[in-house]
Amino acid sequence: MNWEHLLSLKRFGDTNKRLRKLQDETRLGFEVDYDRIIFSSAFRSLQDKTQVVPMPIKVGSRKEFVHTRLTHSLEVSVVGRSLGRVAGKMLLEKYPVLKEEQGYQFNDFGAIVAAASLAHDIGNPPFGHSGEKAIGTYFKSGEGEKYKEQLSGKEYQDLIDFEGNANGFKLLNESRNGVEGGLRLSYATLGAFMKYPKESLPKKPTKNIIDKKFGFFQSDKEFFLELANELGLKRNDNNLEIGYYRHPLTYLVEAADDICYTIIDFEDGINLGFISEEYALEYLIKLVKDTINTKKYQAMTSMSDRLSYLRALAISTLIKDAARIFEENESEILQGNFDTALLDKSAYKAQIADIINLSIEKIYQSPEVLEKELAGYKIISDILEVYTTALINKKENRETNYDKLLIRSLPEKYQNTTVSVYDILLNTSCFVASLSDSAAVYIHNKLMGKQL
């Protein structure tokens, strides 16, 4: 892989090459990507999607507002921008032709990583981490299992392992009437967005981080191949029909996400009282012990100030460490020979593991989180059953009056039944995934006759 191709400014439908040195410096193409994402309806819906803890939650007599998918994504984009800029400075020194002949600046790398980071959760379903599993369970062992014989192996795998990353790729690029190519982001940003550049089968063929999940549905295979070809991604031939090595900047997007969920989810747990202050601050101090200003820290009298200071210091510490690892392994990454996340090589790996293990025990497995996830399973399954049944009935010319009413209640783009069974099932799953937590509850109540 080479950086000239990896930094492609091409967008869907372009017939002429976009050159960096001809870009308007007041509105760069990579910055346009960020703007298009943040103004999209799919991104706005993240404000009412659970990150980990249902929001808001009562702490004593007051409500505590915790991170949503939206605030998490904004924070990841800020960390990603910093990582990209540090990496960009290094890369321009290592490959001066990128700046001298093609006009790239270190801020370009920050803009690409920030935009991809902003979109990294855009395809995730409602109800936190269990949303994807709830959709998959419906098709694997729920009522949706009956469609298995009508699908190819890969099509069925797309559904039973429904993947937010693949749905995000679909959302960003899906054409609609009058809107070709979706948001039409630059190929560099789309490449950095794709954490798992493979299809759903074979499942986890290796222990390489790129094979952990999959990044596109069968419906988006053609465009993915065009993207991979334009970027010059290296083929991964480990028993894969279609699989590639990552865009190098994807490692920075992943690191930004890892840093934020490690530290920020932990911070939410402290603020909510799931983790005792004294115990939690001790964990963070272990992470920043080499850089903490003890005198400054001890002068702070409020818990929130102490926590904010440690959080900022922890994020800064991990940004510097991730950037170091990226720089040291950049050549290996370009060759496709780097098989872990950056933070798996961190000098602070033990401290990170301690924080994550405590978060799992005290936050992710708390009654509040488990209750929301349980409700989500039921809500998602019921909505899928009602709508898929109505749509398939219409396709097979046996729809009832009730089916007609149900289909009319769907957004127009999900009403089409002239497509394949796979497309109907996938589109309905994507509709459910697009719902915010509140919208899913509202629709479920309507369908179950609990609300007029």
Image: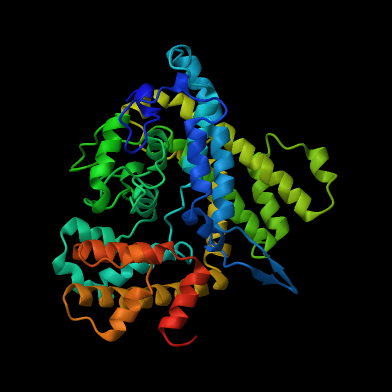
**Residue 291 in the image: above or below residue 444:** above
Is residue 91 visible in the rendered image? The answer is: yes
Q: Residue at x 59, y 41 (%)?
A: 78
What's the coloring here?
rainbow
Front-lying residue, 190 or 128: 190
Q: Place residue 154 in its image quadrant.
A: bottom left
Q: Residue at x 53, y 24 (%)?
A: 106
43 on left or right of 225: right
Residue, far front: 178
Give how far across and how far down residue 73 sits, in percent: 54, 49
Of the 4 image quadrants, the one containing the N terminus is: top left
Q: Place residue 338 in its image quadrant.
A: top left
**Residue 87 in the image: above or below residue 36:** above
Give how far across and how far down residue 353 sits, in percent: 52, 49
Front-lying residue, 66 or 333: 66
**Residue 228 in the image: above or below residue 303:** above
53 on left or right of 29: right
Q: How many marks?
A: 0
Give how far across and how far down residue 182 sits, in percent: 38, 48
Give how far across and how far down residue 379 sits, in percent: 42, 76
Q: Place residue 19 in its image quadrant.
A: top left
Q: Which residue is drawn at 31% across and 62% down?
A: 427
Front-lying residue, 321 or 55: 55
Is residue 200 visible in the rendered image? The answer is: no
